[in-house]
Image (cartoon, grey):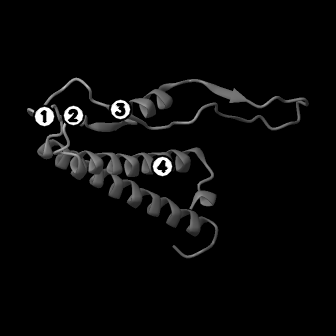
Amino acid sequence: MTTLLTNSTFRLLENTLDSSALRQRVLVNNLANIETPNFKRSDVDFAKVLQKEMTSSFSIEAKRTDSRHIPFSGSGSSVDPRIVTDETSVMNNNKNNVDVDSEMTKLAENQLSYYTLISQANYDIKHLRTAIGGRG
């Protein structure tokens, strides 16, 4: 699927899907360690990084050695999710801070987000196929 993802919208969609898949693994790991003493829950900090990238005006421009060259510019950085650990809260006597209800809610939200992103990707790919003369 990576070869089809050629424009910035598809790359952003792909990065967001990757982030959502990573978040799912992190949240499942939290639940797997719910009884582990001193375990601290983690989460994926992608939304803040994505927001920063989307509002950033930083871009690079290709050098033009001739006025007849076509101008080209693009984003100068990539958006990568970060795993962050919550070291500040404590939920029970063994110093573990995983709350099953909170984690299950986050899993459900993440799953809905992932399915929405997959639907958008399928919609965009269908339109691309139609545009190049194929069947949707």
Task: Give the amino acid at mark 3.
Answer: Val
Between 118 and 40, the one lying in front of the other is 40
**Left or right: 101 as drawn, with respect to 128:** left
Between 42 and 94, the one lying in front of the other is 94
Distance from label 4 to label 2 (Cα)?
A: 36 Å
In this rendering, is residue 77 above or below 126?
A: above
Could you say which disc has been placed on residue 22 in the image? none
In what element is the residue under mark 2? loop
| Label 1 sits on residue | 94
Q: Residue at x 80, y 38 (%)?
A: 70
**Upstream in the sequence, badge 2 or badge 1?**
2
**Upstream in the sequence, badge 2 or badge 3?**
2
In this rendering, is residue 81 above or below 133?
A: above
Distance from label 2 to label 3 (Cα)?
A: 16 Å
Distance from label 3 to label 4 (Cα)?
A: 22 Å
**Upstream in the sequence, badge 3 or badge 1?**
3
